[in-house]
Image: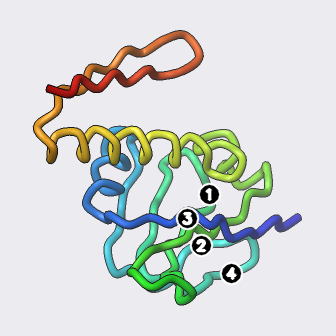
Amino acid sequence: MSRSITIKAEIKSLSILKKVCGILGYKFVENQKQYIDYYSSKPCSHAIKIPSARHELGLVQDETTKHKTYNIRGDFDYNGGLPQTVGSNAWKLMQKYEEEQTKYAAMLNNHICETQILEDRTRLTIYVD
């Protein structure tokens, strides 16, 4: 059964997303114009391949925003493997993206960012001079 959804992710930095994909063991495929869904291929601007999943994630440009941002599309049917790897509604991917985006912003402002991996979460501490 198909469970295709669009997640309003507001991805602003493809370079940060590429880094996150590498950290998580996913493959970011720039300019791939179709992603694999339950029934067929669907249009996208870029795709993310998840090694342990049959389905892929597609990045689609959000035409409703002033700045260039991307949303995530995917088929989150349990049998396709996405919920088990990226989490339902891609929360694992988005959590890591937000973490890396915060670290990058801290670095741009010459702040020190300390990361602690805890049992059920990641704690970022930003030191401002």
Looking at the image, do the residues carrying marks 3 and 1 touch, with CB atoms under 8 Å apart? Answer: no
| Helix, strand or loop status at disc 1 | loop
Residue drawn 38% across and 66% down?
12
Q: Amino acid at mark 4?
A: Ser
As drawn, the label of residue 57 is 3
The image quadrant where one finds the C terminus is top left
| Helix, strand or loop status at disc 3 | strand
Measured as percent of width and height from the top left, residue 90 is found at 61, 50
Instruction: Identify whether 124 is placed above or below 16.
Output: above
Give the alpha-carbon distance from disc 4 to disc 2, as whole Å: 6 Å
Q: Amino acid at mark 2?
A: Ile
Residue drawn 74% across and 57% down?
76
Instruction: Identify whether 46 is placed above or below 12.
Output: below
Give the alpha-carbon distance from disc 4 to disc 1, as whole Å: 12 Å
Lower sequence index among marks 4 and 1? 4
| Helix, strand or loop status at disc 4 | loop
Determine which residue is flagged by label 1.
54
Determine which residue is flagged by label 2.
36
